[in-house]
Image: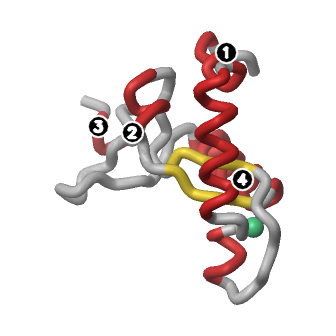
Amino acid sequence: MHEEWQHFYGTAFWQRRRKQQLKAHPLCKCCAERGIVTAARVADHVEPHKGDWNLFALGELQSLCGSCHNSRKRFIETRGHSVDVGDDGWPTDPKHPANRS
Ligand SMILES: [Zn+2]
């Protein structure tokens, strides 16, 4: 699926940010939590930016390997929403059932 914000990833700004993230955190965070050492390939946004440039540019990143990144994405796509919660413990995704009226 092609989102309108896909071009964010083509910017020189992002290329530099991604490179810095992978240099600072070269191992997959998800695998490391399971005691596995895997080289990270993807600088993933901890909080999905959904086309918000500020979040995209300044949001926290985590280094993931390809398969962890795909399974995280697939999880969100198959459920139709993210299960991430904000500081107040409420789901951050507007598509989450708790946020539907
Ligand atoms: Zn991994």
Tell me if the residue at label 4 has its CB under 8 Å from ligand 1: yes
Q: Which residue is mark 1?
A: 7
In the structure shown, which secondary structural element does the residue marked by tag 1 occupy? helix
**First in residue order: circle 1 vs circle 3:** 1
Residue type (three-letter) at the residue carrying disc 3 = Asn
Mark 2 vs mark 3, CA separation in Å: 8 Å
Q: Does the CB distance between marks 2 and 3 fall below 8 Å?
A: yes
Mark 4 vs mark 2, CA separation in Å: 18 Å
Residue 50's x, y, as percent? Answer: 49, 27
**First in residue order: circle 4 vs circle 2:** 4
Residue type (three-letter) at the residue carrying disc 4 = His
**First in residue order: circle 2 vs circle 3:** 2
**First in residue order: circle 3 vs circle 4:** 4
**First in residue order: circle 2 vs circle 1:** 1
Mark 2 vs mark 1, CA separation in Å: 22 Å
Mark 1 vs mark 3, CA separation in Å: 29 Å
Q: Which residue is mark 3?
A: 99
